[in-house]
Image (cartoon, rainbow, N blue to C red):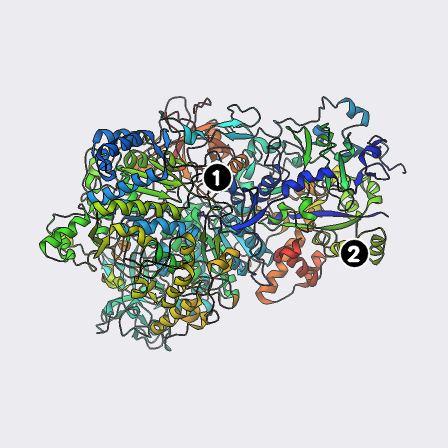
Amino acid sequence: MRVMAQVAMVMNLDKCIGCHTCSVTCKQTWTNREGVEYAWFNNVETKPGIGYPKRYEDQERWKGGWELDRKGRLRLRGGSRTQRLLSLFANPDMPSIDDYYEPITYDYDTLLSAPAGEHTPVARPKSLLTGEDTAITWGANWEDDLGGAPEHAPGDPNLEGIREKVKFEFERTFMFHLPRLCEHCLNPACVSACPSGAMYKREEDGIVLVDQDKCRGWRMCVSSCPYKKVYLNHVTGKAEKCTFCFPRVEAGQPTVCSETCVGRLRYLGIVLYDADAVTAALSVPDPEDLLDAQRALILDPHDPEIAREALAQGIPHDWLEAARQSPVHALISKYKVALPLHPEYRTAPMVWYIPPLSPVLDAVTAVDGDSSDPDDVFHAIRDLRIPVEYLANLFTAGDPEVVAGVLMKLAGMRGHMRNRSLDGTVDQGLLDSIGLTAEEVEDLYRLLAIAKYEDRY
Amino acid sequence: MDSTGVDRPRPRGRKFFARGEVSADGRTVHRIDQAEWERFYRDRWAHDKVVRSTHGVNCTGSCSWQVFVKDGLITWEHQATDYPSVGPDSPEYEPRGCPRGASFSWYTYSPSRVRYPYVRGVLLKMWREAKARLGDPVLAWAEITGDPEKSRRYKRARGKGGLIRSTWDEVNELVAAAHVHTAKAYGPDRVVGFSPIPAMSMASFAAGTRYHSLIGGTLLSFYDWYADLPIASPQIWGDQTDVPESADWWNSGYLVMWGSNIPVTRTPDAHFLTEARYKGTKVVAVSPDYADNVKFADDWLAPHPGTDGALAMAMGHVVLTEFFRDRQVPYFSEYTRRYTDLPFLVRLEERGDAFVPGKFLTAADLGQDVENAEFKTVLLNEETGEAVVPQGSLGHRWGEQGEGRWNLELDGVTPALTLHGDNAALTTEAVAIDLPRFDVGETEGGGIVRRGVPATRVNGMLVTTVFDLVMARYAVGREGLPGEWPKSYEDTEAPGTPGWAEEITSVPAATTARIAREFARNAERTQGRSMIVVGAGANHWFHSDTIYRAFLSLVLLTGCQGRNGGGWAHYVGQEKARPVTGMQHLAFAFDWQRPTRHMAGTAFWYLATDQWRYEGFKADELSTPLGTGMLQGKSFADCNAQAARLGWLPSHPTFDRNPLDLADEAKDAGVPVADHVVSELKAGRLNFAAEDPDNPANFPRALTVWRANLLGSSGKGNEYFLRHLLGADAQVRGAETAEGNRPQDVTWHDEAPEGKLDLLTAVDFRMTSTGLFADVVLPAATWYEKHDLSSTDMHPFVHAFNPAIAPPWEARSDYDVFLGLADHYSELAKTHLGKRTDVLAVPLAHDTPDEMAQPGGRVLDWRNGDCEPIPGRTMPKLVVIERDFAATADKMRSVGPLLEKLGLTTKGITYHPEPEIELLRRTNGVRGDNRPSLATAEHMCEAILALSATTNGRLAVEGFKQLEKRTGTKLADLAEENEGKRISYQEAKKGPQAVLTSPEWSGSETGGRRYSAFVINVERDKPWHTLTGRQQFFVDHDWLTELGEQLPVYRPPLNMHRRFGSQQLGEPGRAEVTVRYLTPHSKWSIHSEYQDNAHMLALSRGGPDIWMSTQDAERIGVADNDWVEAYNRNGVVVARAVVSHRMPEGTVYVYHAKDRNVNVPKTEIGGKRGGVHNSLTRLLLKPTHLVGGYAQFTYAFNYYGPTGNQRDEVTVVRRRSQEVEY
């Protein structure tokens, strides 16, 4: 057993308001400079939608992440070392700027400097790449709130297998927001793919970085990352990516995206994992087993044996303590409400998500019975608008039962707390159905609802 | 490694040059060195200092921010997280903010930043020439503006570039000269200032309003003009707006978001909603589109836009049926008896073969010889059947006898809610009544529905209770009553049922019933913790007051108002300047003179921009057939003129004569000024300017806009502004009013004036349409470059602005801008104005005894000979102010003596600030005659905080003690815990400071409670500021009766097609679609402005866009991102289409605000720069918003007045040539 510490994140999508504050504060702090105008270390996507860059989840196309070879061994989907070295100068799996978007500015100074003329001055769009006039045809967040969805969103790879169920019609509308950043994977494809040895995972906290001195701009990291969260700085010619705000994390501060998240949906914490077990865990043949396999990698810091081993291997005592207090550990391992994004990429991502509830589907159109009990105010999980199969394609490699189970826990928590706050009663049947005790539900409630600053990070 | 290992992906030799540890399986690499290169990001993160500030924007945010500074430059901003705690069992406020705010620092160094003072070249050249030749700036201005050719030349150049850099001295002199000349030649009321929302930056607001107040200028209201004022609030509560802080959502058990897109428009607070769900709160979204907030709801109801009132009426039908008729809920009936007007008696008047509701029965009707008898309403004692005049009505609020009696205590009387049923104490009869309905008929006036009520006779007068009228209104049938009643909830014919509402709204009847039932049941179980969060989506309609009254009836019937976690939560505009007393007294220079020229914004713009000349129908069309015809033949402008005449609404410019000259004439004649004015009016020699707005004598002449983007954002009827106010290019497409529909009292000039305004001055830090069209553009400091204060209704804190850097280039804070202007004004005024007497026409004021000027809200017009013109009774008060115009600059800089002499009065309570004045002498220093200094913005902030009861516990206790004398109930204990506490500006600068419980507002923060509106009223029996002293379902002003709005009622959106016909161009082969045109608040602009930020443009579509449904797009052959044009009679908008299935068919959105300054091509239809979102809208005054002089229907600034609503509009959309020209 090799015990290692990892800084990990959980985002509660059920609380995400899609405001993009995280994206903006991140942009202002880290990529508000030449060469990375188009790069958003943190971005927020509207789902369903094809995302940024376009259809990045289509690994048939982009060949990101890992797969099992015929012998059942992990290998980069992008191909063997030889194949990749041969394509260094014409990588067919490399997204072009059009797959992201052309960054834009405007000739703002015209507004003040325009000479007397016939028309009201206006700032025209200019390409930040060429400086020329341009027409805006795509953007960093083009699909926000389902803009253009009828035309584009059918291309969402997560609709694979459920296209019959998802209709882009007013009455059947659903959407949610998916904030994304580098996953700081336990098995980062980018690190493995880098021919220059510029990419590495920090020993002490697992943060994945690109050494700016070493990077030679081969961009194998860009193509091999299935989340497309490594970007080429087109001025320096080097790769850049989310640093998990290591200068802040080292100083005991949360990442910028976490601290500035006004939805208060981000949790940051330490998890301990067994580095020796990673390969085997990610090599399980059935993708639907990957979630459990990845969860199993995460060690229980409360287990005295593991604690002893961790200390023996040089994990500092305060880190061990932090791992015990970690809200991330509680949400992933204790309550099992957080799920990894696309576990089937076999990278063991370390940014996990609590899937979102949604409104009941039939309220707009169907006529429901008027005999309903006014004290029974919540709807069944299977009646909600977001198809659990869609969420399953994102978070469980296609297993809808797991997603439904998480949603039931959230709904069960709501029901329990409604009873508690209305008349103080406890419905044991409800608790049994989600497999939690009243104390556990209330603890989960405090973590998700009260969510004090100290409890989030 | 075994066979499940890794196909080793990296070169073996890599370990050497990577200096890292390759994992045993060769899969990954770990590094432990603190590599040199990491400095790259460490340096990026490093900064020199972090300065706390906030944002001065009308978004209701008022968030605390940390501004990072490096090498003297602002780099970025992150939210502060150190808000005072909400308590251990609630989420906290941190970290409040949003993406718009997080990108604000972009503006600091933006290339569109206004860096220097600018004047348009053509004007500057004339100015320099005339000034050099004449040697006197005032004479120079007089010559340029008096020369038709010259003035036409510079006005026509507006909006067409050619700005030239000038100097502060030069522009200050020019603007001051214009202001002095205007006062001298036309009157000081022709100098107009517009700046909205003091709460967003109080000192910056106060600087300009103080200047304008001191020079006798006109200050325009904004809350009503922005249509953010919920007119229903004064109608029901006699209160402008009072709502819960967002942390109180957490206390709700059932929360309906009704036309309020919380994640987008209340971004910092949305988490309280998402988190409350985990506590078991059910959430319902009512929204025509699948908006961001719908995601968080358990149920989504999607009524057709503008039909929300019908849905709410149907829900009321269910609540009244199931919780009042079929079963009585003790909590509801006790609440409504005590805190609402439901038990009060209303006289029934015969009309045809039935009755109609008339006026409230009053003590005067009973023949009681008591003080203010016409303002004491009456109810029946359920046990004895006797008529009782309870305490707490308006008649007890003023006068000697009311002292100690203005409260809601019932002294053992149980008010009879209904006259129906077996009550041996009462002799009743069932009578038929007729009520208006507006869902049918050929005109806006609708039709009639017959219902019945139980009635009884008091003093021979036939009366019924408001409750019984409400039951009739909501179609809840009871045994033995005549009239038409529904057979079931599904009955589609009877107005009021869920089935009827389904026909109108599309929301299934069963769903409506279920939500209503759940809402009320939750309120029953929680004692009032059901809440309706309501917003602009419902408030911006022409008939928003009727929509809101239908909503609010739901929270009143279920006892939710005045309860934590319950009631209405109206969030539209940042109306709550928590330290209101200090702010308003200093902002309007009440320390030197009272009052100031407050003007109702919408009425002003309606006349000034000549939108009144483009009406398609008259005001009388809005009257119910049950009316008496009192609006017969009146246009909207006629109604406005009458409101001015009768002292209801302010009217500035006031008369068709310079008020300074009027005073001189009186002096020459040796009569009091007021007498002179009255006799001139009576003789017809003097008229109100509102009666002839196109007469050059009545034009507003100089307008200064600061902290606002009037021409690119808030100006409804934008193209009319450009054409008539400015004389610039415009794309108005419709025709003027046809002869038969023109006003009868207001003068019509055949030729409409263009370019009324001589000078438009814009003060801003960025270049918007307002700057593009202004004659003078002044560079303002940004929010990170000045001292100021902000507050909001969303949270209970006051925030300070701190400068992170000094204003760069030649920028100045708003405070310093107006001090500089005042210096130049004073200098020029010495010779040109000196000391003059000014006369102000002041409307009958709310929260004063003026509320009793016009009993019963009966309309008597002295012009028609209905009565005598008596100032303060049948017409405005006439108040004389002696002005020393040359002393303006000195007065700006110090606190005047009237604060000690007259005290500070807010909502009828007067505070005496001697200790605070002494304190301010010591903290701010003194000027002039030992007066506390206001020479800097910091001084102003300190003074605002010291002089307000929310921030000074001594004043709060004093105010409550004074109120106790009037109510006779215990109140001061609410503030005593904080009597010694005072929030200083120094403290505010450190971080958010929680305010104190104060009589300035109606909620209680005592003991760390969350603020909820009207908690004090409900818990301490303090009356509302209404006629009955209770929350009113029923109102009886003549004009509300005439319009059929005595009770909550559904009025559909105005039928534009009916009055203006098809507006399609109908060119062959070009598909067009006519759709409803809505302008909700944008996700990608800082509130209603600031859409030009590069970050926000990058995250949206990068320019103007129009959201449309898949079906509408298909109909006109439009694909996502195609260029389209939207046009109607008011103007043209060119934009990119955003096609989405989340949009309902038949409705398009152009999100507020789309200014014309970024990525807007020329239109195909008009050939000019494409419009702003308000190019397609136009103002229309609702007559009921103009009333005054009676009870809660009396004027206060931003409290009552016509709203600048815009949601009823429709537009034509078509695909345009995809080749666009800029």
State the residue at coordinates (38%, 65%): B918
In the rendered image, the vertical position of residue B386 relative to residue B1178, given as above or below = below
Placement of the C terminus of chain B among the 4 image quadrants: top left
Residue B472: % across, % down:
35, 59
Residue A215: % across, % down:
73, 31
State the residue at coordinates (78%, 39%): A187
Residue B360: % across, % down:
28, 64
Residue B710 seen from this side: no
Placement of the N terminus of chain B among the 4 image quadrants: top right
Circle 2 SS class = helix
Residue under label 1: B1144
Q: Real-space Cα distance between discs 1 and 2?
A: 58 Å
Residue B244: % across, % down:
47, 59
Using the rendered image, report if marks 1 and 2 lie on a common chain: no
User: Which amino acid type corresponds to the residue marked 2 in the rendered image?
Assistant: His
User: Which amino acid type corresponds to the residue marked 1 in the rendered image?
Assistant: Pro
State the residue at coordinates (72%, 22%): A89
Q: Tell how many labels.
A: 2
Residue under label 2: A317
